[in-house]
Image (cartoon, grey):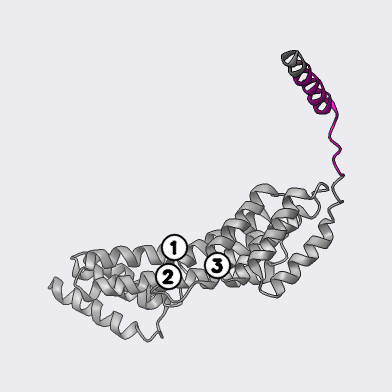
Amino acid sequence: MKKSALIFILYALTILLASCAAKPVAVKPAADFDAEKSFAEANKLIDDKEYAAARNTLLEIKNRDLTKKIAPLAQLRIADSYLREEEPDLAIAEFRRFLEMYPDHRHAAYAQYQIAMVYFNQIESHERGYGDAARALAEFQKLKTEFPRNPYKEIIDLRIEKCRNTMADYEFMVGEFYMKKGNYSAAAERFEGLLRHYPDYKKHERVSLNLGISYRKTGQKEKSEEVLNRLIEKYPNSPVAPEAKKELASIKADKK
């Protein structure tokens, strides 16, 4: 009798548990997410230099903004926050992510400009700035090509000019280094490239003189005469013209 009672109780408990499991669990509705309010809070955190907290809020906006109106701005502000925090590499990565996610967004030109400016602001001098100048130049040119109506037209050309001057200064420095070491073939190669890629270089006359000297030192006297004569004809009053004439006189003396 006791065993039958125990079986009955277990059976009743089984029925009761099954009945409870079948009933739907009531879920409280989630509060409406205010993306604009959260965005304002994130901006305040950035102003207060609470960058990590700001980014957490911005990531939440990206995940929960069902309208997708604030989400792109949140991604942009994540990149901006890294700029403010002086983390240029992370900033570039986030700006690139924005361009990948929202290539046609109204702020896409801004993101591209900021990428270029990160590299541009890292240019220190022609000795150490060639790489960043080259990268900045490429990004500025991309900005001009992909966003022809960008609002930065007036200053882009000035930035590009500085990039090119920095790169040309570096090439000039390397060419002179080779000359001092007596490696005139390598020097001539550098000066040739400099004149070819940077025809408006500010030290054009000195480059031409150095190229003429390098040609003469490597036995390429005809090339040397051609470069030096062109230099004198084009810049007769240049400070380097007398030296160019001396080089020509030396070549003529060697021919006798």
Range of residues picked out in magenta = 8-28
Q: Residue at x 61, y 57 (%)?
A: 94
Which of the two residues, 247 or 95, is positioned nearer the viewer here? 95
Dot placed on the residue nearer the N-terminal end, 2 or 1: 2
Residue 5 place in picture, x, y as percent: 77, 17
Question: What residue is shown with label 1?
Answer: 197
Q: Secondary structure at mark 3?
A: loop
Q: Secondary structure at mark 1?
A: helix
Q: For residue 18: magenta?
A: yes
Name the quadrant of the C terminus. bottom left
Question: What residue is shown with label 2?
Answer: 168
Residue 217 place in picture, x, y as percent: 19, 70
Q: For residue 16: magenta?
A: yes
Task: Indicate the quadrant where residue 157 lies.
Answer: bottom right
Q: Is residue 25 above or below residue 111?
A: above
Proximity of marks 3 and 2: CB atoms separated by less than 8 Å: no
Task: Tell me if residue 107 can be seen.
Answer: no
Q: Is residue 103 left or right of residue 198?
A: right
Whole-angstrom CA distance, mark 3 to mark 1, is 33 Å
Proximity of marks 2 and 1: CB atoms separated by less than 8 Å: yes
Residue 232 place in picture, x, y as percent: 36, 78
